[in-house]
Image: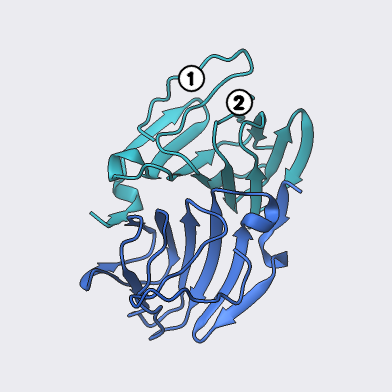
Chain colours: A cyan, B blue
Amino acid sequence: MYVHANDQRPAASLPGIDHRTLAGNADGLAALSLWRQVMAPGAATPPHRHDCEEVIIVDAGSGTLLIDDVAHPFGPDSTLVIPRNAFHQIVNTGSEPLVTTAAFACSPVHVYLPDGQAIALPWAS
Amino acid sequence: MYVHANDQRPAASLPGIDHRTLAGNADGLAALSLWRQVMAPGAATPPHRHDCEEVIIVDAGSGTLLIDDVAHPFGPDSTLVIPRNAFHQIVNTGSEPLVTTAAFACSPVHVYLPDGQAIALPWAS
């Protein structure tokens, strides 16, 4: 299966975040995962890190990227570059849904909190 | 630099293809590159391969993905999964511009033709 309709991909969610994995380990990928997420106004990820590089395309909305507790505001049609293992957090500081497409240089994707704990994600990655 | 406005990224082109590298080796990435391309109706890439996995998000437009000479049609809001080293070709078979965001599990990205020749790209990847 080389072609997928995005609205047919399995849907999952965390509080304030609607998620679809557009491509990942279940599609035969070993080094690349793509996630589409819609974050509600006021919602935020926890501070976390991945053991691979991540790039986030901001499709719509605006917010703030915190990296090592420094705030970097962003608008729509922008790109966020997150180094491997950098602790980061995304906050929807705007009044519209924040729509993002995230690419990870690993598959599956693991998420680690600052205390070292791995989060059990409710979606395949 | 963690945040970039996409319309400020360097622009380049090949016949029928307008390109911006949204993130890549020049941004400190070693294993991940993101490209945004707009392909004119009727335009096509040559058959080619990469020595890393690729995922293409179809933001707008429609076309055909050829993998090993088998055609897979796609519409807007779809995802194309291209295995490492698979020969593939993208053709805009629609009447509208084909807008894509491609993610590669390598940085920089190398492009090889069926005869083994590497293409010298007019953009940093």
* Residue found farthest to the front: B116
Front position in the image: A110 or A99: A110
* Residue found farthest to the left: B70
Label whose residue precedes the other's in the sequence (1 or 2): 2
Question: Is A55 displayed left or right of A15 in the figure?
Answer: right
Assign the C terminus of chain B to one quadrant of the image.
bottom right
Name the chain letter of the residue that bears numbered label 1: A
- Which residue in the protein does label 1 denote? A119
Sort mark 1 into few (<14), some (14-19) or many (20+) by Cα contacts within 10 Å: few
Residue A48 image position (x, y, % from top left) = 60, 26
- Name the secondary structure under disc 1: loop
Q: Which three-letter amino acid code belongs to the residue tagged 2? A: His
Q: Are marks 1 and 2 in contact (CB under 8 Å)?
A: yes
Residue A14 image position (x, y, % from top left) = 47, 26
Q: Residue at x 48, y 19 (%)?
A: A119
Sort mark 2 into few (<14), some (14-19) or many (20+) by Cα contacts within 10 Å: many
Quarter of the rendering containing residue A47: top right
Residue B46 image position (x, y, % from top left) = 38, 79
Q: Residue at x 51, y 74 (%)?
A: B38
Name the chain letter of the residue that bears numbered label 2: A
Residue A81 image position (x, y, % from top left) = 65, 46
- Name the secondary structure under disc 2: loop
- Which residue in the protein does label 2 denote? A48
Rendered position, A89 above or below A94: above
Question: Is B12 displayed left or right of B106 in the figure?
Answer: right
